[in-house]
């Protein structure tokens, strides 16, 4: 059975729900509880758990501590992963200062930029010259990067990241990137996300106005 991005995303939701339940004093959990916690169905929960080899007891449910431990191993949360940011503009700087990474299994090892005026080797997250990107990736065995560069140079920059050993990127450039089959790209288009929200807000407003006029 092929693993989908949605099923992996649900694993993170399951883990967060289990941590909340553990905090509340629960020791065991059933698929129905997990379904309620993340807004899924019990059938979906059991299907996901079966896909990833997470076994429970039909009558006794799942041991929360054991399930968290297995999820941590599956999701790689048993160790820290260094990540780089390429592009230290507004988005890049915001990500470098994002404190949420401190509570996760990720940490920003360094940022890179072609603008020499942005270079700051002594910062908590150092910003280094782009020319040092390849050596840094190889020396520190970096596998994941964040791409926060203008769309016109995004593909060129990504090609250099991949050549140095990067296996996956979080892409903030509003452009489709060409990558090999075994390469992970997650696109984040902030403008498009906001436009989508606005569309639904306006659609609901129009519907309410239409219903008001009918009444």
Image (spheres, rainbow, N blue to C red):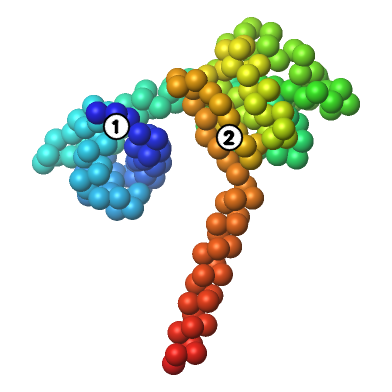
* 132 horizontally vs 95: left or right: right
Residue 91: give x, y in percent of width and height.
Answer: 70, 39
Q: Quadrant of residue 171?
A: top right
Q: CA distance from mark 1 to mark 2?
A: 37 Å
Residue 163: give x, y in percent of width and height.
Answer: 61, 12
- Taking the spot 59% from the left edge, 20% from the top edge, the residue there is 82
- Name of the residue lying farthest toward the right: 117
- Taking the spot 63% from the left edge, 19% from the top edge, the residue there is 159
Quarter occupied by the C terminus: bottom left
Q: Quadrant of residue 98?
A: top right
Question: Which residue is labeled 1 in the image?
Answer: 67
Q: Residues within 10 Å of mark 2 (few under 14, many from 20)?
A: few
Quarter occupied by the N terminus: top left
Question: Which residue is labeled 2 in the image?
Answer: 176
- Name of the residue lying farthest toward the left: 59
- Taking the spot 67% from the left edge, 29% from the top edge, the residue there is 154
Q: Contact (CB < 8 A) between labels 1 and 2?
A: no
* 210 horizontally vs 2: left or right: right
* Rendered position, 161 above or below 154: above
* Rendered position, 19 above or below 1: below
Residue 74: give x, y in percent of width and height.
Answer: 36, 25
* Rendered position, 133 above or below 17: above
The circle on residue 144 is none
């Amino acid at each position: 059975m092929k693993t989908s991005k949605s099923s992996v995303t649900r694993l993170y939701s399951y883990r967060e729900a289990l941590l909340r339940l553990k905090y509340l004093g629960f020791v065991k959990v059933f698929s129905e509880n997990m379904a309620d916690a993340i807004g899924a169905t019990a059938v979906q929960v059991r299907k996901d758990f079966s896909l990833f080899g997470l076994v429970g007891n039909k009558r006794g449910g799942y041991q929360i501590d054991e399930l968290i431990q297995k999820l941590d191993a599956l999701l790689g949360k048993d160790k820290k992963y260094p990540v780089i940011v390429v592009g230290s503009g507004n988005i890049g700087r915001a990500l470098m200062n994002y404190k949420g990474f401190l509570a996760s299994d990720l940490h920003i090892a360094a940022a890179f930029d072609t603008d020499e005026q942005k270079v700051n080797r002594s910062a908590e997250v150092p910003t280094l010259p782009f020319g040092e990107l390849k050596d840094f990736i190889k020396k520190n065995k970096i596998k994941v990067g964040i791409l926060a560069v203008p769309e016109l140079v995004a593909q060129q920059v990504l090609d250099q990241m991949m050549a140095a050993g990067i296996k996956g990127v979080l892409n903030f450039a509003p452009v489709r990137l060409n990558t090999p089959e075994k390469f992970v790209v997650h696109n984040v288009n902030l403008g498009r996300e906001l436009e989508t929200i606005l569309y639904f807000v306006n659609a609901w407003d129009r519907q309410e106005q239409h219903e008001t006029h009918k009444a």
